[in-house]
Image (cartoon, grey):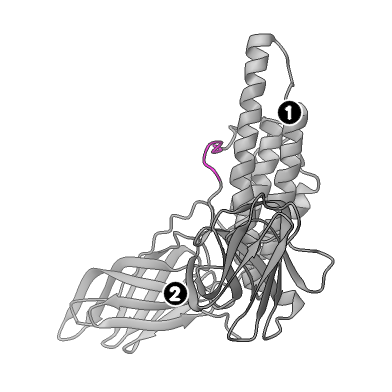
């Protein structure tokens, strides 16, 4: 660091929700508080993936109204067999099966799952077809993530399969892609979170429709609670398809706990505001215990990052085991102690009696566990032929890393 330039961090965080216990306290609003703003219009956000096919590994066959099958053995020894039952198609149809070379963007341990793309894209069946996959290299059952996608990589999702079969048998009512990949706990959590996010948007849309239809009936016809059972059903589905999946994801990977807590609170408040439950607290059975469990997961969640950057001669490249707790950055003989958390204070010391203090913030626009940035500034001094004082602005990048052992 130059004598006229000092090390200073000021990091500002603008996450939608806090990870602190104060967040939980603030969210547990009392009856009569203003309801949270809920988007009843936007559909669920789908997860799209980038598919690369291996055109050298392909097979075609014709199926008829009487049924038929198409098979492919990939270069790694994996076998794919599509069985189409009778009455599934109305006319003779040529089906092509092509091996997937890579699949980028899917929540899997790597981008080379055992998968095929089936064409013609969008082909629908009147009876479910079955795609049986025998991997060339075994994937342990607990790590199997069986998935599908539409078109050329749209709407990645966990696939419907034969639940009683030890073999991988995917049930298809429509083409395009399907396969199986290896998923660690964190990858499984990401799959569950993807499902929950999609279900959340769709169910909130249905809830908005039911509430508005009920309003029309009430205003124009004087009929009250026409949509009561429908709304209750949507609440139940939201709990099963969103909250429970997000809680399971949080137990597998703590970075999903905040979203689970948000949606648990959202459901509780909506049951009070729309569903007519007397109290917004405990509208969801066992709310307090579930909320506390998620708050504990959040409090104990480690968020490891590699922090790289600085200003002028001050540059750091430091692996931090948990940015939510006090951590240290070093570089060029300087040592900076930060208070920890997404925003806070710091002090530093270094050559020439350099010292200073400041504040900092971390921005994680895509959430905890995703890349982010830091910016900073503060005041400090160094001693040379005289005492130099100054300020500066620094920029850093945060890249997620594996948890420290």
Distance Cα–Cα, label 1 vs label 2: 45 Å
Magenta-drawn stretch, dominant element (helix, strand or loop): loop
Is residue 333 shown above or below 205?
Answer: below
Q: Which structural element holds mark 2? A: strand
Q: Residue at position x 24%, y 80% from top?
A: 382
Q: Is residue 42 magenta?
A: yes
Where residue 404 sits in the image (x, y, percent)?
57, 83
**In the rendered image, is residue 136 in sight?**
yes
Q: Which residues are magenta?
A: 37-43
Tell me: residue 132, above or below residue 195.
Answer: below
What number is the disc on residue 399?
Answer: 2
Pinpoint residue 362: horizontal percent, then vertical percent.
42, 64
Q: Which residue lies most toward the top here?
A: 221
Q: Is residue 147 left or right of residue 83?
A: left
* Frontmost residue, 137 versus 174: 174
- Would residue 299 be visible to someone looking at this image? no
Question: SS of the residue at dot 1?
Answer: loop
Farthest residue to the right: give it. 164
> In the orientation shown, which residue stands out farthest toward the left?
385
Residue 225 position within the rendered picture, expressed as x and y whole percent measured from the top left: 74, 21
- Residue 403 is covered by the magenta coloring: no
Residue 276 disc label: 1
- Residue 308 sits in quarter: bottom left
| Disc on the earlier residue, 1 or 2 | 1
């Amino acid at each position: 660091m130059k004598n006229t330039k000092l090390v200073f961090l000021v990091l500002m965080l603008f996450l939608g929700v806090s990870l602190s216990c104060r967040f939980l306290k603030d969210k547990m609003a009392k009856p009569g508080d203003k309801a949270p703003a809920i988007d009843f219009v936007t559909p669920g956000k789908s997860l799209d993936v980038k598919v690369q096919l291996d055109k050298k590994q392909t097979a075609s066959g014709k199926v008829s109204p009487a049924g038929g099958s198409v098979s492919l053995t990939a270069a790694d020894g994996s076998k794919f067999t599509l069985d189409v039952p009778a009455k599934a198609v109305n006319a003779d149809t040529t089906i092509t099966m092509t091996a997937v070379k890579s699949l980028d963007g899917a929540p899997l341990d790597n981008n080379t799952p055992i998968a095929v793309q089936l064409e013609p894209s969008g082909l629908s069946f009147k009876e479910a077809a079955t795609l049986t996959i025998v991997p060339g290299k075994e994937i342990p059952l607990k790590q199997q993530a069986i998935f599908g996608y539409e078109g050329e990589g749209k709407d990645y999702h966990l696939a419907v399969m034969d639940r009683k079969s030890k073999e991988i048998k995917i049930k298809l009512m429509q083409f395009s892609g399907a396969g199986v990949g290896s998923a660690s706990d964190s990858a499984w959590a990401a799959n569950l979170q993807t499902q929950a996010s999609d279900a959340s948007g769709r169910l909130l849309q249905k809830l908005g429709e039911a509430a508005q239809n009920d309003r029309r009936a009430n205003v124009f016809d004087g009929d009250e609670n026409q949509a009561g059972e429908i709304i209750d059903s949507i609440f139940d589905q939201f709990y099963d398809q969103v909250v429970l999946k997000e809680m399971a994801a949080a137990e597998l990977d703590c970075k999903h706990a905040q979203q689970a807590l948000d949606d648990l609170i959202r459901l509780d408040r909506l049951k009070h505001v729309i569903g007519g439950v007397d109290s917004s607290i405990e509208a969801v059975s066992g709310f307090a215990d579930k909320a506390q469990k998620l708050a504990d997961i959040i409090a104990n969640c480690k968020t490891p990052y590699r922090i790289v950057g600085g200003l002028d001669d001050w540059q750091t490249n430091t692996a931090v085991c948990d940015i939510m707790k006090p951590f240290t950055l070093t570089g060029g003989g300087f040592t900076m102690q930060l208070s920890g958390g997404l925003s806070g204070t710091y002090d530093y010391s270094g050559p020439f009696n350099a010292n200073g203090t400041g504040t900092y913030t971390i921005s994680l626009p895509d959430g905890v566990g995703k890349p982010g940035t830091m910016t900073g500034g503060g005041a400090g001094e160094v001693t040379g032929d005289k005492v130099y004082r100054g300020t500066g602005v620094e920029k850093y990048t945060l890249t997620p890393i594996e948890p420290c052992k």
